[in-house]
Amino acid sequence: MICVSTKFVVLVLIYVIHSITCPARGTLPGTWELLVPNAGIASMHTAVTHYNTVVLLDRTNIGPSKIRLPAHRCRNDPNEPILKKDCFAHSVVLDLKTNAIRPLEILTDTWCSSGQFLPDGTLLQTGGDLEGFRKIRKFFPCNASSFCDWVELKDVQLAEGRWYATNQRLPDGRVIIVGGRGAHSVEFFPPQNGAVPLPFLGEVEDDQLDNLYPYVHLLPNGHLFIFANTKAVMYDYVKNVFVRDFPVLDGGPRNYPSAGSSAMLALTGDYSSASIVICGGAEYGSYLQHITDSPAHTSCGRIEATGSDPVWEMEDMPFPRIMGDMVMLPTGDVMIINGAMKGTQGFGMASNPVLNPVLYRPDEPVGLRFMTLNPGTVPRMYHSTANLLPDGRILLAGSNPHVFYTFKGDFPTELKIEAFSPEYLSTDRANLRPVLVDLPEKVAFGEQFEAIVTVELPVVGIVEVNFASAPFATHSFSQGQRLVKAAVSSAIPKGAGKYKICCTAPPNGNVAPPGYYMVFAVNQGVPSVARWVQVTA
């Protein structure tokens, strides 16, 4: 008889259980890569431009960053509490082709501000703290060999101060700016009639301000879905009336500082239906009481906002998560990445970083929608971002759980920029990956156009042609994010692995507001590298 000690059996069982619940790194789908070891700043706000560059932006009153401005461009502000003469950059631009970083000059404080691209590809940036409270800024993108920088508008400002607001591009190309701390109103850019009261934001405000960075989605019926705290409304911004109240989403607050995340699922078919997903968040009271170890929510709610009798369908993620970022992939799946398992948003308010991304597959039944992915090694917590890139990867930047840049102790300020490659970019699917060899640079609403692709293996089934917006990512919500699946014909063989696809552009601005989109061809779940296409009226 072979005798085995009880202690040995227990250790074996612990190892087996750990292996089941925590798979070894590399055995799960997806791969990670380091793009930039030191970006100079920790990006609180991130946006991808149609020149294949990335604008990264932090706050200006944080003291020295790790990248300097040219000496002649120092910022002089006698009211600045940290540096009266600030020769450090607080915004940079990343060239995706070379991974080179160039410093940008930002003059007013952009802490917890908002943003959105205009139809011509200009990045509009609004609000912030202190002298940035009512500021409007623009960044006119350019190619990497040219020089472009932030421009602060001097002849126009916000009608009301906006700190923790949300921006959304509208069907006519204007931008609506929703909410902010103490701002229970909306306003428009270009400016129009000042601020318009939105009492809903005041009605849902609680004593820890869970109405900040409201989730705003433009529905294909032209109205806005606005969610704050636990409640949502359908808002007709033209008439300034509420069209519908939605049921309360159970599980506690979901917006800043309780930090869930939200996405509108891909628009497809006749574009009459739109569903919203909201996942994660902190326990109520964690922010007020500074409880860093209170478990985050695992729950997600999903609602067909355009349905006749909408209700929340509930399901659970594999991990509790606050401060997660929901990124729409070219396929229509949603990546949930970044965040922590415990605590809440705020400086030093979270613990237990969640390193595993998860994939949300909306076409699967409840219980089978989530897939756990390969974990990273860098905690991405407070003030971190995630953005879809034109090559299908996810760009990860930022994380600064401290008042100032802090590079010691738990969860130091993070200056590295990484990329996560979903499973669709794995080498065993390379022969399925289409190449977009021809596509118009501009299409009008409803216009029919041709996409020419090449694929190594013969095409089986439909090759999708999908329009992905470039949102402004900040504080666990990507402002203006949407994916529109164009109506397409079957791929017509043209010889030598080449195919023609007849496509119809999105029908109107309700479905796809005018502007630049990353257009992907998707073959059997594998996306091409995108081409930028401007959608116009």
Image (cartoon, grey):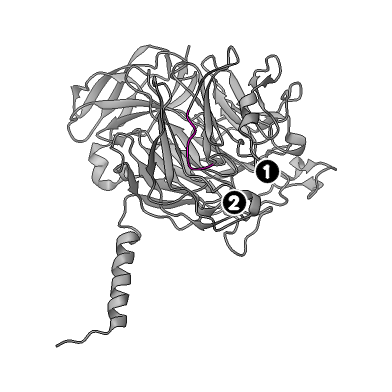
**Is residue 466 one of those drawn in magenta?**
no
Q: Which residue is mark 1?
A: 59
Cα distance in 3D space between marks 1 and 2: 25 Å
Q: Please tell me whether mark 1 sits on a helix, a strand or a loop.
A: loop
Sequence-first tag of 1 and 2: 1
**SS assignment at label 2:** helix
Residue indicated by mark 2 = 286
What residue sits 30% from the left and 43% below the top?
367
* Amino acid type assigned to the residue bearing label 2 in the image: Ser
The nearer-to-camera label among 1 and 2 is 2
- Judged left or right of residue 194, residue 233 is left
Mark sitting on residue 422: none
Relative side of 268 to 469, left or right: left
Which residue is situated farthest in the right direction here? 78
Give the class, few, some or many, for how many residues have Cα within 10 Å of label 2's Cα (few <14, many ≥20): many
| Nearer to me, 389 or 237 | 237
Q: Which residue is nearer to you in this view: 47 or 450?
A: 47
> Is the residue 334 above or below the residue 11 in the image?
above
Classify 214 as above or below 85: above
Callout 1 crowding tier (Cα within 10 Å): few <14, some 14–19, many ≥20: many
The number of discs equals: 2
Does residue 232 appear anywhere in the picture?
yes
Residue 515 locus on image (x, y percent): 50, 21
Magenta-colored span:
247-252
Locate residue 415, reporting x and y percent.
57, 52
Kindly indicate whether the residue at mark 2 contacts the one at mark 1 (C-beta within 8 angstroms): no
Instruction: Let me know if residue 393 appears in the view.
Output: no
- Magenta highlight: main SS: loop
